[in-house]
Amino acid sequence: MQSYHSIGAYYIHISYELLSAHQNPGSQVFRESSAWPGSVEAESIEIENREGQKVRLKNKVAIITGAASGLGAATAKMFGEQGAKVIVTDRDADEGTAVAEEIVAAGGEALFLKLDVTSEDDWANAVAKIVSAYGTIDILVNNAGVSGSHPDKLNTDTWDVQMEVCARGPFLGMRVVIPIMQKAGIGSIVNVSSVSGLVGLPWIHMGYNAAKGAVRMATKAAAVHYTSEGIRTNSVHPGMMPAMKTAMLSGDPEARKERIARVPIQRVARCEEVAYAILFLASDEASYISGVELPVDGGWTCQ
Ligand SMILES: NC(=O)c1ccc[n+]([C@@H]2O[C@H](COP(=O)([O-])OP(=O)(O)OC[C@H]3O[C@@H](n4cnc5c(N)ncnc54)[C@H](O)[C@@H]3O)[C@@H](O)[C@H]2O)c1
C-alpha cells in the first residue's frame, strides 16, 4: 500500500511495507560475531529491489544536503534506486522537490525538506520531521556547497561564506544527526570535500581550500570520536565535475579545457561517478572503513 502524507508545505511518499520493515528491521540484524568477538556483522541482508535486482541501501534512511542539483541530485537518485528512503534537502525548494518527485516516479521513496545548512533551526526542524516519520537516520551526506572560484583571491566575504556553508554546514549536520545515530548504534556519514581539501589550486579562493580542508579533518576527528559507537565517517574528494551553479572562474569553458588537460584521465567526472563512491562509503559494504579521504579525481592529486 502506498500513500502521500503532507509534512508542512512538502510531501512524503511512504510505502507502508517498507516503513514497517524499517521499524522492525528483520532484514538487517546486526549482532556480535561469534567468529570474531567484539566485531559486529550483518546477520542477514535482503538485497533485492522489486525487479529482483540487488539493492545496496535497503530501508536505510538517508538525508542528503544540497540535493537539488549536481552531485547531490545524482546521489539522491542513486540512493533511491538502491532502496533507501531518501530525504532530499536543499535551500532551493523548487529544484529539490523536482528531484524527490523524480525518485518517487522511478519507484523509489523520497521526501523533500527545505534546509539551509547554515541554519541551526532548519537542521533541528528537518531532523525532527525525519525521526517522526521514520524513527531514525542511517546515513548523512553533507554535500551542499558554494563555488570557491572567486576572481578576487583576497575577498573577505568569500572566506566567510565558504567557512559558513562548506565547513560549518557539515558540522551542524553532524551535530544534530550523530545523537540519533548513537541511539541506534549504527550510522554512516559521508562528507563531500574536494581536491581543494587536499591541495591548493591557482583559480580557487583560499577560503574554499580552508573550508574543504576543515571538512577533511572534521571527518577524521568524528571517526576517532564515534566509530566505536557504530558511526563511520568518511570524506569524498571530487576532482573536476560539471561546473557548480555558483561557479565563477571554474565555469569558464576555455579555462576548463586547459585544466582538463592537466588531469591524467583527461576529462571531467560525471556526477554519477562520484555518487558511486558516496554510495559505497554510505553502505554496509564499507563496514570496516572509517576516517578515510577518498579522492575521486581521475588521478589529479597523485601527480
Ligand atoms: N563541481 C565540481 O567541480 C566540484 C568539485 C569538487 C567538489 N565539489 C563539491 O561537491 C559538492 C556538490 O557540488 P555540485 O558540483 O553538485 O554543485 P551545485 O552547485 O550543482 O550543487 C550544490 C547544491 O548545494 C545547494 N546549496 C548551496 N548552499 C546551500 C546552503 N547554504 N544550504 C543548502 N543548500 C545549499 C545549492 O542550492 C545546490 O543545489 C559541493 O560540496 C562542492 O563543493 C564540486
Image (spheres, helix red, strand yellow):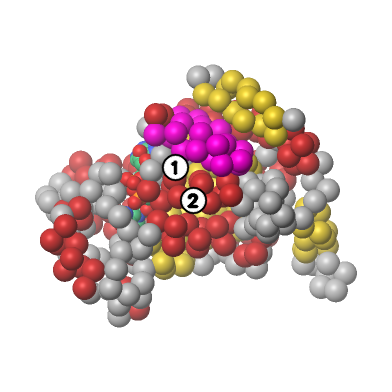
- Residue 53 lies, with reference to residue 38, above or below; the image says above
Question: What residue does disc 2 label?
Answer: 75
Place of residue 285 in the rendered image (x, y in percent of width and height, measured from the top left)? 65, 64
Residue 188, by quadrant, is bottom right
Q: Residue at x 21, y 73 (%)?
A: 261
Type of amino acid at the residue the image marks with label 1: Ala
Of the numbered discs 1 and 2, the one sitting upstream in the chain is: 1
Q: Is mark 1 within 8 Å of ligand 1?
A: yes
Task: Point out the image quarter for the N terminus.
Answer: top right
Q: At 46% from the left edge and 66% from the top edge, which residue is drawn?
A: 293
Mark 2: secondary structure: helix
From the image, tell me which residue sits under label 1: 67
Q: Residue 94, relative to residue 83: is it above or below? A: above
Q: Is 38 or 100 nearer to us in this picture?
A: 100
Q: Amino acid at mark 2?
A: Thr
As helix, strand or loop, the secondary structure at mark 1 comes to: loop
Q: Residue drawn 46% across and 67% down?
A: 294
Alpha-carbon neighbours of circle 1 within 10 Å: few (<14), some, or many (≥20)?
A: many
Residue 175, magenta (yes or no): no
How far apart are the two marked residues, 1 and 2, measured between alpha carbons?
8 Å
* Residue 176 percent location from the top left of the image: 56, 39
Magenta span:
95-114
Tell me if residue 96 can be seen. yes
Dots 1, 2 in contact, CB < 8 A: yes
User: In the visual, does 109 lie left or right of 9?
Assistant: right
Q: Is residue 158 above or below residue 190?
A: above
